[in-house]
Amino acid sequence: MSSFSQYSRGRRTRALLGLASAALLSATVVSGAWARDTAKDAEKAATEPPLHMLVSLNKQQIQVYRGLDLIETSPISSGKRGHSTPTGVFSILEKRRKHFSNLYDNAPMPFMQRLTWSGIALHVGRLPGYPASHGCIRMPRPFAKSLYSMTDRGMHVVVTRDPAKPQSVRHSVLPQPFVPETKVASLSGKNIQADPALRGAIQPANLQASLPVAELENPYFDKPLRMIITPQKAPSRTRVLQRLLNEMGYDAGPVDGIFGRKTRAALSLYQEGAELPVTGNVTDALVAKIYAEAGYEKPQNAMLRVRRKFRDVYSAPVTLKNIDKDIGTHVYTALDFEKGDQTVDWMAVSAEGDRGGDSKDLLDRVVMPEKVALEISKMLTPGTSLTITDRTFKRNTGLGTDFVVVTR
């Protein structure tokens, strides 16, 4: 090969390498710019109030709120007679731009956003001006497409008969962000004199330094919690008495809730030992005495459960006052806040109208133990919601869902 050919080939190679390097540099610049823009978008989204949707079946309308601000409204068509759309508290479980019904002749369901695994979803469909679907919530294409671009899995959709509206709410029972205590670093005169590097450099003083506590930072700060408080069925008083009498050395028989011969005999022996009238009968005063002697505390009458990313992460007993009164279904949502903030505002939506009373007043009936409140504050994230209801959630809640509460 001639020297000229070698030179030409080398020049072409260098040129190609130069173009490749330039392309790589350009791609790196574009990639870096895209990453910075994506990070900025993510940071902006994290500091925005949470998005949620309110659907009114009577008004055949969906309203989209960003926190307390109404940003979008659209007509809908919900389920017709025999296929009525359920009311309640739902969240978006799945999203698909192109989807076809598994139940109804492979019917197209563009921009589908699933609310239940049993077939209820938001999607594009015909709007005749009245309920006409098989249970889904139909929307016009432009609105459905726009909504699809704004939502994420886990966002709340509250379906009611009459229109609902979010309201601002403040109450001591609503969790606030956890702020770790700061440690104090003190530079006394004694400390300064003991260190040659400090002598003559600074005057004695007490300096407070906020020391970062990395292990207390919430690694799931961008993942909203879903919490729910529901009444707990009280344990049988007879079962409790049988268990306590057995623990105290009286043979009350099996803990089966049946006040039979052995349980009555054990109760009579207890009354005899306590120098009480031996009747074998249960009275409130006798139960209170046994509880006190056994060190038994009546269990709290409600349970708080917490989910993150559709999975259970925490539960604890709490108390609901006036448990026999209607509670209704109320959804409280924490608005946006940043790491290090000490307070956050909340909003409330009643999912059953006036049933259970005003959402603000209901919070007066909730008693949350201090330890439980502390644990929740450590986990609290922007967009976290708390549902308080006397409806069951177990029928429609499972792996891959949030707490689903059907109110009809």
Image (tube, rainbow, N blue to C red):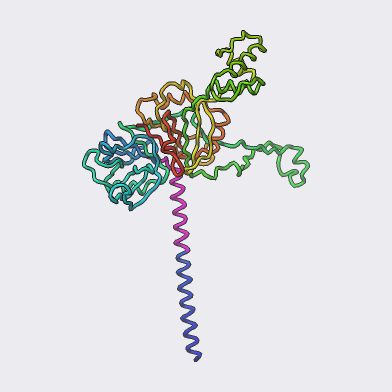
Q: Nearer the viewer, residue 340 or 177?
A: 177
Residue 355: quadrant of the picture: top left
Name the residue located 46 percent from the left edge and 62 percent from the top edge. Answer: 29
Q: Residue furthest front?
A: 261
Q: Residue furthest bottom?
A: 2
Q: Nearer the viewer, residue 158 or 361?
A: 158
State whether residue 347 is above or below residue 104.
Answer: above
Query: In the image, is residue 135 part of the stretch drawn in magenta?
Result: no
Q: Residue furthest top?
A: 277
Q: Which residues are magenta?
A: 28-50
**Mainly helix, strand or loop, the magenta region?**
helix
Residue 408 in percent (x, y) is at 35, 32
Residue 215 in percent (x, y) is at 61, 43
Q: Nearer the viewer, residue 53 or 110?
A: 110
Residue 126 in percent (x, y) is at 24, 45
Residue 337 seen in render: no
Give the mark count.
Answer: 0
Name the residue located 37 percent from the left edge and 47 percent from the top edge. Answer: 150
Question: As drawn, is 311 to the left or to the right of 72?
Answer: right
State whether residue 79 is above or below residue 367.
Answer: below
Question: As drawn, is 384 to the left or to the right of 125?
Answer: right
Residue 383 seen in render: yes
